[in-house]
Image (tube, coloured by chain):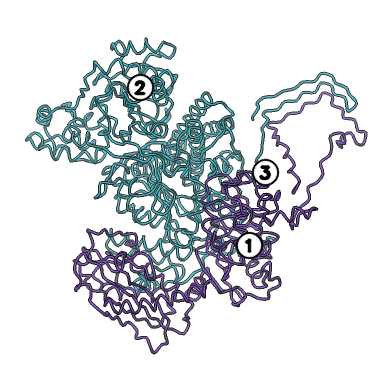
Amino acid sequence: MEMFSDIPVEVGLVHEGERIRRKEMQVELGGPDIPDKFELVRVREMDRVEQGKISIEGPDLSEMEQGKAYPLGILVEVAGPALEEDLEGVFERRIHEYCNYIEGVMHLNQRYDIWIRISRKSFQKGLTSLVPIGKVLIRLFQSELSIIDRIQVTFLTDPAKVSGMAAEARQIYDARDARARGLSDEEVDTFYACALCQSFAPSHICIITPQRFPNCGAISWFDGRAAARIDPKGSIYPIAKGECTDAVKGEYGGVNEAAKKGSMGSVHRVWLYTGFGYPHTSCGCFEAIAFYIPEVEGFGIVDRGYKDVTVNGLPFSTLADSTAGGRQVDGFHGISIEYMRSPKFLQADGGYGRVVWMPAELKERVGAFIPEEIRGCIATDGEAKTVPDLKAYLAKVQHPVTARWMAGGSPARPGEIPRSAVFPAGDLPVTAGGVRIIFKNARIHADRVIIQPVIPRKEEKGA
Amino acid sequence: MDRKGISLKIGEFASDVGQIRDLELTVGRITRDTWAETMGPTPFPGVTALRSWDRLLLSRYRPFYLPFCDLCCLCTYGKCDLTGGKRGACGIDMAAQQSRIVLLASCIGAATHISHARELVTYCIGRSGTTHRIDVGGVNVEVEAPITRLVSGVRPETLGDLERVLEYLEGQVTALLSATHTGMEGDALDFESKVLHAGMIDQVGMEVADIAQVSALGYPKADADAPAVPLGMGTVDTRKPVILVIGHNVPPAVGIIDCLHDRGLSRDVEVTGICCSAQDMARYAPGTKVIGPISWQLRYVRSGIADVIVLDEQCVRTDLLEEARRVRSPLIVTSEKNCLGLPDRTDDAVDQIAADLAAGRLPGALILDPEKAGAAAVETVLRVAPERKKQGVLPGLQALTGDADRCRGCVLCRRSCPNDLPIPEAMEQAAAGNLEPLGALYDACVGCGRCEEACPREIPVHSCIIAACSDRLTGETFTMRAGRGAIQDVEIRKVGGPIVLGEIPGVVAFVGCANYPRGGNDVAEMAVEFAWRKYIVMTSGCAAMSIGMYRDGDGKSPYEMFPGAFEAGGIVNVGSCVANAHIAGAAVKIASIFARRNLRANYEEIADYVYNRVGAVGVAWGAMSQKAAAIASGFWRLGIPVIVGPHGSKYRRMLLGRADRPEDWCVYDARTGEKVQVGPVPEHLFCAAETREEAMVLTAKLCMRPNDTTRGRALKLTHYMDLHRRHYGMVPEDLHLFVRTPADIPITMKDEVQRILAEKGWEETTIPDPTLLLRMIRAGKG
C-alpha cells in the first residue's frame, strides 16, 4: 500500500461494499437532511490548475460535531491537452468509486444528491480531515486516468459557499444532459467499437454511437471516448465513421470495416438502425431482444427481467438463444434499454410504429420515449398473451402495422427464404421411375434409428 | 419416446411396389430426436475418445504423487514394495499404482452417483411416469441438462430419456473399473486420463440424478429465493416424536413426509436429517429440519433425540446399528447397498414391522420399498416415542469427570485423531473439573470416533467432548437456503457484463464433505469473505450446511447476509451432492450463451472454452469421500481447478503446474494462430492448502484466465494482492507473471506494481483469443 502509506486508513477495492450505519458514523456529509450538496468535475486550462492542491472552504471533519450532518461540495478541477468538456461526466462518476475505496468512507448517489458518511472507527484511526480524502482522489484519478496532467480538489463545507456553487453545478448538469441527449450520430465523425465481450464471445463487437448504446447498456459514447483515450490499446477503440451509405438503415463504411475486422470476417455489413437484413450482432449480455412476429409484421420486445413466455410462446431465454454468440440473425436483435430511448431506435423499420408488443413493466420504463400516438397501440402482456390475441388487439386499436396487412401480398421482410415444396406421398421417387425393390433373404441391422418428427409448416404470414 | 429392441420378420410379401422375401429387420432402438443442433464429434464418448484433450491438460499439470501407501496389495503376488523405483510383480511402478488407486477411487465415486441416479430415475418414473417432462427452471432455463447434452449428445426431454444416458454411464464405469485390474493399464498418464473420464461421467450421473428429482419431486426450480430451512440440532422440537434420516437418496424421506402428510401428522412429528438426504428433504418439504453435515451423525444419534433412525446410502456410518441400539432407537435401512445384516421385511405389513420394532423384537429392519419404509418409520415412531425416554448415552457431568479421571494420558487418542486434537490434555483438565478445554475441541472434531476405538480404557472420548459442551449442541439454531438447483440462463446473461467490465472477479464453489482441519467455520468465513469481495459464491452438500452454521455480528447467517442469486456477492446453495452438476453446468452454459458454441457431444471444444475463459475455482475444504474424488475429477476435465484442505493430500496426488517454466503456458491465439505466452493461469488444476488463509490466496489466484479483459484482470489481481498482503504480509512474488499490459495493473496499487515489474524485467504481452486446440484457429478459415 505504498501509494497510500501516508493515509491513516486503508485504501482498496475491498472496502467498496462497506456500509456505515448511523450509529457507527462520525459525521454525515450531504444526504437527505441537507438540501445543498454536489460533486463536480471541470476541465480547465492548464494554468488554472495547481497540481495536487487540496483546499477546504469551511469546517474540516475534526471541527464537525459527532453524529451531525453537514453540507458538502466536492469540486475536482483537471487539466491536460487530451481533456475535453465531454469527458467531465465520465470522470465525475469516478468520485463515487474512489471515495468508496477508502476504509470508513461510504459514498452514495452522485451529482446534486451525494450522501457520504465517515465512520467513527476511521475517524479514530486518524481520518480527521478531508485532506487525506483529497489526496486519495488525486492519486487515483491520475493513476487510472493518465491523460490528467494536473488536478486540484476543493471541498466546500461552508453552507453559503456550497449553496452558491450547487446552483451553478445544477446548470452544468443540465447543460451536460442536454448535450448528451441531443448529440446525434450525424454530428460526430468518430464512433467507438467495444470488444470487451470478445473475452466470452470471440467474434462479437459492439458499435457505440451517440444514439446507439451497446447491447449491454453499460457504456455511453462519452464513456467510450474516455476509455479509448485513457487506454489507447484497450478493448474500446475509436473507429472512423466513414461514408454514410444509408442514413435510414444506418450503414457506414467505417462500421462495416470495423465489424469485418472485429468478427474475423464473419460479419461484413452492419445496419445500425434496423432489425432486418444486417442487424447489429448480438453478444450474450444484451438487455432485451427485438423479435419479429411475422403474423402481424411487427416487432415484439422482451427484456431479460421478464419471467413469462412472450406473445409468440417463447421466453426470453429461448429467443436469446436464437440470436446470441456474435451472430447476425435477420429479425432477431439483441438491444439495450437505452437504445429504446433513442430517436434512431429501429428507425429503418418504422421505429415504435413497428413495435407491437412488450411487457408492461418495460413499456412503463421507456414509455416517455414512445410517441404519444403509438403508445396506446402497443400491446403488453396484459393485453395479449398469444399471437391471435395480439392480432385482434392491434386491429382494434388500429396499430400502424395494420396498414401493412391491408397492403396485401408478401410482407416486406428482407432476407426471407422461401420454403421448399414437400413431395406429396404419391410421388415418392422410389416409384417414379417404375423401379421395383426386391428384398430376398435380407437382413437389416441398425443399432439405433433416429426419427425426427416432421416440422409442421408455419401458417402463412398475414393470413 | 424411446423404443428398444424392435425386430421385424417378413416371410413373403408382394405388391406393386416391390417384392420381399425373408426380410429380417432388427433395430436396437428407435429414438425421437427433435434437437436440431448438429451432432458434435464425440457422442457417448468411450474411454479414450477424449484422451488427446486429457494429454493436453496433463502436459501442463503433471501428476505430483504423495503416496499414502508405498505398497500394492491388490493381488496375491503381493504385497509389493514400490519404493525407490521398484516395480511390483505385475510390472507396475509407483506412479502408475498411485494413479491407479486414484482411478479406483474415482470409479467408486462415479459408480455411487450413477447407481444413485439409477435409483432416483426409477423411483421418479414409478411416481410420475416415463413421459414426465424434465423441467429444472421453467422458461428461464433453455439448456436443461448442459452436461448430459455436452457429453452424450442427447437432449433429454422426459424422465424416460434419462434411462438411455444411464445405460451409457453404467457401461463406462464398468470399463473404467476393469482398467484397474492387475495387468491392465500400465501407464500413469493413461490412468490419469481414465480418472478424468470417470469424473466426466460422474458429472453426467449427478446431473441425471438431480434433474430427475427436481422435475418429479417439485423441488425449487432454479429459484434464487428458495425457502429458508431450519438448520441445527436446536431447531428440533424434542417434545414431538423425532425421525432421523441419514444418507443421500431421498425417496425414503419422501415416503416419511408423504405418509405424515396423508395421515395429517405433518405438524406432530419432527423429520430431521443429516448429510444430503437432509438437503434434498429440505428441497421437498422446507419444514423439515437439517441437523448438520455428515460429522453430526454420532453426536446426534448419541444425544438420543431421534426416536427412529432411517438410513439410505452413502457416507452413512456403518456402525449405526450398534449406536442406535445403545440409545434404543429402532433402525430402518432402505438401500440394497446398505443392508447391515438386517432381516428383509419389505414384503411384510407396515403394522407388523412397526410392532416388531417397537417391541424391541428386532433392532432394525431392511425395507426396500421407500414408500413402505416411510410408512413403517412413521408407524414405528408413533408407537415408540411415547414410551421411549429421549435418553442418550452422552455422559452427565458427574459421569464425565469420572470418565476423564480414568484417563492415564497414554496419548493414543490424540495419535489416532485426524486433526491431532489435544485430547489427553483436555481430559486431564476435565478430571480436575475444568470442562472448558474438552468442550473447546468440539469445533474441530470431525466426529469420526477414532479416539474411542484407540482408547485402551474404553473411555467414550467422543461422547465426553460432546457432553462437555452439550449446551452448544442443543443451542445450534441456524437457517440455510434450500437447494435451488440449476442456474437460470438469464442469470448467466446478466453477469456477462459485470465480468468483462471487471466488477465480478470470479466464481468460487465451496463443496464437499465435512472432514475439515479446524471445523466448518473456516468454510463459512471463506464463503463470506469471497461474497463480500463480490465473487459469485456457489455451494452444495455438507459445505452448504457449514456455511449456514455461522452468524455475523448482527446474528445473521450468510444466507441472510447475501442473496441466493447467481450474481456478484451471491451465495448460491444448489442442493445436495448430486446438485454439484449445476455448478459445472453453469460454466458449460456460459459457452452456449455467450459464444453460442454447440454443446451437443462437443466436449473438447467446450472444455477448452471453459478452461481458457471461465474464472471458476472449486474449494472442497473437507473432501473425504471417493465421490468427492470423482466430483473433483469432473471439474478438472473441464479445466476448472480444485483446492482441497490438508486432508485432501491423502487423495495421493496433486495436479500441479510449473509457473517457473514459461514454455508450459502457451496458448494459440485463435484469431491469428500465433502462439502466445499467457502466464500460469490457472496455475494448478488440483492442489491442497494447509490453512484457510492459504486457500483464500490460492483461490483468488486460480480465478485468473488468459481471456481476462484488462479490467477483469486488474480486479482479480487486486484481490490476489490484497489477500496475499493480508495473510502473508507481503506482495506476491509471482505478481509479474500475471500482468500482461499496463492496463492490467490495479489502480490502487500502481506505484508498487510498476516498481516490481521494473525489478523483474517484465515485458508487455498481448491478450489472445485463447485456445489449446489447433482446430479452433480461425485465421485462414473462410
As measured in the structure, the alpha-carbon distance from the residue carrying label 3 to the one carrying label 1 is 30 Å
Amino acid carrying mark 2 in the image: Leu
Chain letter tied to cyan = B
Q: Which residue is mark 2?
A: B265
Q: Is residue B78 visible?
A: no
Q: Report the amino acid beneath label 3.
A: Pro
- Shade of chain A as shown in the rendered figure: purple
Q: Amino acid at mark 1?
A: His
Residue annotated with mark 3: A388
Identify the residue shown where x is 26% and y is 70%: A70
Nearer to the camera, B646 or B483: B483
Disc sitting over residue A280 in the figure = 1
Secondary structure at badge 2 equals loop
Q: Nearer the viewer, residue A450 or B322?
A: A450
For the residue pair B765 and B742, the one nearer the viewer reads as B742
Please give the chain letter of the residue carrying mark 2: B
- Would you identify the image quadrant in which residue B463 lies? top left
Whether labels 3 and 2 share one chain: no
In the image, residue B750 above or below residue B96: below
Disc 1 element: loop
Work out which residue is located at the far right of the displayed protein and give it.
A434
The answer to whether residue A316 is left or right of residue B68 is right
Residue B686, horizontal then vertical, whole percent:
41, 48
Residue drawn at x 41%, y 10% is: B349
